[in-house]
Image (cartoon, coloured by chain):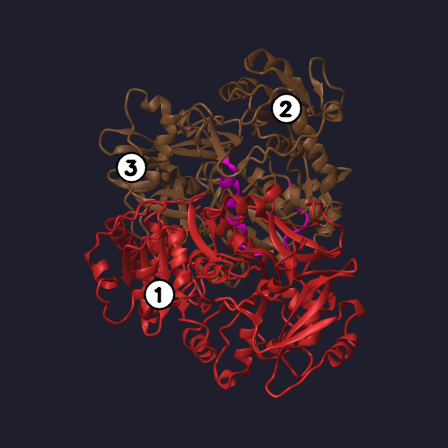
Chain colours: A brown, B red
Amino acid sequence: MQLTQPLHKSLDQCPDKVATVFGKRQQSWRQLVTRVSRLAGALQQLGVAKGDRVAMLGMNSDRYLEYLYGVLWGGAVIAPLNVRWSALEIAYALDDCDARVLFVDDAFRPMIDALRKHAKALQTIVYVGECEAPPGTLAYETLLAEAAPADDARCGGDDLAVLLYTGGTTGKPKGVMLSHINLLSNILGSLLMVPRDELAVPGLHAAPPFHVAGLGHILQFSLRLGTHVLLPSFEPGAVLETIERHRVAETFLVPTMLRMLLDHPDFSKRDLSSLRMLRYGASPMDTALLERALGELPGVRFAQAYGMTELSPTITVLTPHYHTAEGRAAGKLMSAGVPVPLAEVRVVDGNDVPLPPGKVGEIVARGPMVMKGYWNQPGQTAEALRNGWMHTGDAGYIDQDGFLFVVDRIKDMIVTGGENVYSAEVEDAILQLPQVSQCAVIGVPDEKWGERVHAVIVLKPGETLDQDALVAHCRSLIAGFKCPRSMELRDELPMSGAGKLLKFKLREPYWKDRNRQVG
Amino acid sequence: MQLTQPLHKSLDQCPDKVATVFGKRQQSWRQLVTRVSRLAGALQQLGVAKGDRVAMLGMNSDRYLEYLYGVLWGGAVIAPLNVRWSALEIAYALDDCDARVLFVDDAFRPMIDALRKHAKALQTIVYVGECEAPPGTLAYETLLAEAAPADDARCGGDDLAVLLYTGGTTGKPKGVMLSHINLLSNILGSLLMVPRDELAVPGLHAAPPFHVAGLGHILQFSLRLGTHVLLPSFEPGAVLETIERHRVAETFLVPTMLRMLLDHPDFSKRDLSSLRMLRYGASPMDTALLERALGELPGVRFAQAYGMTELSPTITVLTPHYHTAEGRAAGKLMSAGVPVPLAEVRVVDGNDVPLPPGKVGEIVARGPMVMKGYWNQPGQTAEALRNGWMHTGDAGYIDQDGFLFVVDRIKDMIVTGGENVYSAEVEDAILQLPQVSQCAVIGVPDEKWGERVHAVIVLKPGETLDQDALVAHCRSLIAGFKCPRSMELRDELPMSGAGKLLKFKLREPYWKDRNRQVG
């Protein structure tokens, strides 16, 4: 199984069909494959050998897609970088995987000097911008024009295809190694769970390709020989306009993005009748939002995918049926669905013993979508993959019907007086206070209870809140032992470059002389 | 990717659901996995090591399914044998793959002595019959009862999983080597082409598991965690009764079997409302039969799969749409459909150069479903897989819309006066004569035309036919150069054990001193 196979198929089956649409630019599959094979040839001339890592820092585009397939076609490994990271973080990732060639687009032109300074392995920068290439970089179009097309190196199977850097919430970023089989397993399993009458439809890619969900969406539409419609990033007005203009049938988003689409002034003005399917991830969809979406987009089916980068990413899917008015009666909308055909999913205790239905433990998974490991991190790899299962770090339970419910990150669970408290549940309660803008609930050391529930809160401008009011509010919603026993007010919460809350930074001052038991 | 993975999933997801139904016997997935792991343990005690071949000669049953998974669980290779073969042919296959352990059921008890005599590698016979085990064989249930369960050897990916003996139409049988990925690619690609709203439904297996289609159907329903309903063989009355009794949703058949079902006196008496999908193969479905089937089975969708053992087997699928009254207007019913997502399919000339739409050449395929090769036949393997493509030996063309039409076996095409004649087309014309029972059209040497079209005909009892009447009839249906220039009458045609016509035997006497150019 090879990620480049769809390109070969396209030459036989639909060479003149539109392969990519980006702004006013379109190209056929034949044109795409020509550029991809030239890029592979250019990379080989630059000394990139089979298995070498080639990085990219840029917004989503047709050129990004060419980079993905050009690198794979040449037998090398793609390393798409998080565009929200600082130059130092990017340089860390580049050096960690010894990437000597980096692609950069217009948006990151200002970062080039800093990357040159800090990334020691970096030798060649290919400039894929629309503007003139800065001094010392190679202009992408010149590179392609001068290159001889290369044959597909025909890597596949267990060969390493992708390095995706994750983390930052718990320390240094780790490079997740995914193979061709890993990513294809994800695509095939996900598609089997949510059947489509037609595979080769236009799909919109607005999620960033450095996230496994965005990358997987691109790879999936190639396999389907569907037209790739690409936007640089998620901008609701542009998404609505693009769906109408290119008769987009499917896209991937997170629930917040769906809300932004529905709230946008253009929503009612656009013809969205081509939309057939919205896949979403990152969190369940609340009923109010879903009902609104079903009402406003009557022809659209919804499906949720749950997983993580290390799982390529999907291990469970909540199918369209459970989103319909009829299916919602089953009460599964807040679940992550059931395992895809190629994934084994369990909830286990600290000794990896499976727990009975309803019991909360760590979600673990086994199957062909489990990563090869963390780049150059045999210790962390062995830890994550102990006993042959990928340990997600997510806490959850499986109900009597086999549906997975995700309740918290294991590390964010608080054990107080022998009771488990899921920080997410307490945060949900606190966020219902009108004064509160953001909050994070953590466990801090407590002589009597082991840990106690502690709330870190950011108030809206001009608001006030004290411990008594907080507890009184929480007690009206959740059990007494779950209510915060202490609180602090802050101006902001520590976030990662990817916009994830860094709870370990909140916990650090409380635990610096102690060893916290988790999991 | 592992063929045994569904068994592990079943223990987590549906351990108490019915896994197999055979006659009055049912067992749950938990029971099935227990027996499978015990069988693997027993095989290891018998000295079967990873990669060893374990053969079976028997009719389809729940025990056959246990054999398939028990061997794979133990890390060995399954070799299901053609039940229509003679003892000498079976012995040839057993020795060819050095199978030291053979499973035999009641139906083949009479063959045991002959197999012992002729199969030199054979050491152990496991008797899986319902009757008492014959002397010198091991009783299956005793073997299981005394064995310790083994852990799954967790073979997968490119590991050899299955050896299927094919051929006999052109010489000695060849063992086709299929890996886990080969077979799983077939299942995943086929399922993607014909989406199902529900995967875990009861599937009826009436096709023999020594044919790749029958075997693939079993493996597919495991992946779907659907209940396996097994019949020893295709018997129309039993099929109808079983569909009703076990609410079967899907099965696989060939068009002839469908006709037998529709013609059966019980057809109208049985409740077949559970049927959702009929997959068929081996040949297209004629319009009259399909229209009748659609009328009599209004809730059923039809899908055709085309391929061969060496392709695990499916490379193209004709989807349900083209079988509906509306879809038939597209005129694709006589085609084999379009390539599945994981298969590259081409029609090429004798130099492997792709031919334009409409031109007849050899059908070739590439992708993860292509066999590993022929067992111990590096020369024939290299020939079949030359230039990286599996050469099917089938002649066909791809139309402007990308649909594959299969017209003949390459070896059966006749080149006469520079024109290609497809024997199948001539045979179709001859078979419309009411006097004719069977016929075979071959090319024989001709001084003037290179080859000439020659018909070998079996008449119905008491009928007569001469060359003039034959040609007059054919000329009313097909072009003059396609009409037989000579004919012979016979009492029967030479058939293989699998019921395939052996045209090479018909050609032999004409070509014995010459070298026939084909392909």
**Residue located beneath label 2 in the image:** A44
SS type, badge 3: strand
CA–CA distance between discs 1 and 3?
49 Å
Say whether residue B447 is left or right of residue B255: right
Q: Is residue B103 magenta?
A: no
The image quarter containing residue B60 is bottom left
- Pair 1/3: label in front: 1
- Disc 2 residue type (three-letter): Gln
Is any part of residue B338 visible from this angle?
no
Instruction: Report if the CB atoms under discs 1 and 3 are less than 8 Å apart.
Output: no
- Pair 2/3: label in front: 2
* Location of residue B132 in the rendering, given as x and y in whole percent from the top left corner: 23, 70
Which residue is depicted at the point 58% across and 60% down? B194
Q: Which residues are magenta?
A: A179-205
Q: Which mark is residue B62?
A: 1
The residue most toward the left is: B146
Q: Which mark is residue B249?
A: none
Chain of the residue under label 1 = B
Which residue is depicted at the point 70% across and 37% down? A33
The image quarter containing residue B195 is bottom right
| In front of the other: B370 or B227 | B370
| In front of the other: B446 or B412 | B446
* Location of residue A247 in the rendering, given as x and y in whole percent from the top left corner: 72, 50
- Mark 1 crowd level (few <14, some 14–19, many ≥20, 10 Å Cα): many
* Location of residue B219 in the rendering, given as x and y in whole percent from the top left corner: 44, 57
